[in-house]
Amino acid sequence: MRRIRGFTLLEMMLAFALLGMLMALVAGSLGLASRSWDAGEARTDSVGQMRIAESFLRAQFSQLQPWRWKKTQGAPLAFSGEAERVRFVAPLVARAGQGGISWFQLALEPGKKHSRLMLRRLVPDGSLTGFPDFAEAETTVLAEGIAAIKLRYFGREGRAAAGAEPSWRDAWEDPDRLPMLIELQVRPAQGPAWPLLAAAPMVGAEAACRWDNFQQRCR
């Protein structure tokens, strides 16, 4: 009768070692697949967030209104453009056709880990002589995890605007004209920069001008 040979201790140890290596490889593959899936989801969320924010802002900028501070000497336009913040007057796009306008502020604000692209909205107060600080405004987070933004403004600015060529600038301070174009650059904390966003107010740069009868042109 043949005697059945069993496994030696060395063979058992080798088998368990190989099994452990195999399980480690499987676990590593699953972890890599999970991380790839999570990264893919994050990219999808980021792209979706970007597209929604861009579409909303383009529509909002196109609706700029030539609203003036009537309590201020010279009744300047209610528009303030800086490199990292813009304040303007427009109807809320989501409520277009329902009447009424709002004051808006678009800026980069601190978040828990990274800054957020934040839109603040207030109901206009005609008794004021300039934009308030928007501390009590209704807020909408347009995008999370943003490292930096840059705004630029294109148009003719100042008293000599009628004979000047339009140009890009980092700030817009003309009290009588809106910019012809507003450009927004957004750089996320991770991933590539957003496509450049440029929007033109539909009212036109001269819609808000005050006519100078002596010089026969907009001031």
Image (cartoon, helix red, strand yellow):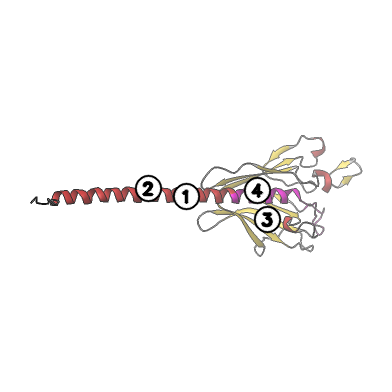
CB atoms of marks 1 and 4 within 8 Å: no
Residue marked by disc 4: 54
Instruction: Please state which amino acid type lies under the numbered disc 4.
Output: Glu
Instruction: Please state which amino acid type lies under the numbered disc 1.
Output: Trp
Residue marked by disc 3: 105
Disc nearest the viewer among 1 and 4: 1
Whole-number angstrom distance, CA of label 1 to CA of label 4: 26 Å
- Compared with residue 66, is residue 192 higher up or lower down, i.e. above or below? above
Between disc 2 and disc 1, whose residue precedes?
2
Residue marked by disc 1: 37
CB atoms of marks 1 and 3 within 8 Å: no
Instruction: Please state which amino acid type lies under the numbered disc 2.
Output: Ser
CB atoms of marks 2 and 4 within 8 Å: no
Disc nearest the viewer among 2 and 4: 2
Whole-number angstrom distance, CA of label 2 to CA of label 3: 47 Å
Q: Is residue 84 left or right of residue 201?
A: left
Disc 4 is placed on an element classified as: helix
Tell me if I can see residue 146 in this picture. Answer: no
Between disc 4 and disc 3, whose residue precedes?
4
The reply to whether the magenta stretch includes residue 57 is yes
Disc 1 is placed on an element classified as: helix
Residue marked by disc 2: 29
Disc nearest the viewer among 1 and 3: 1
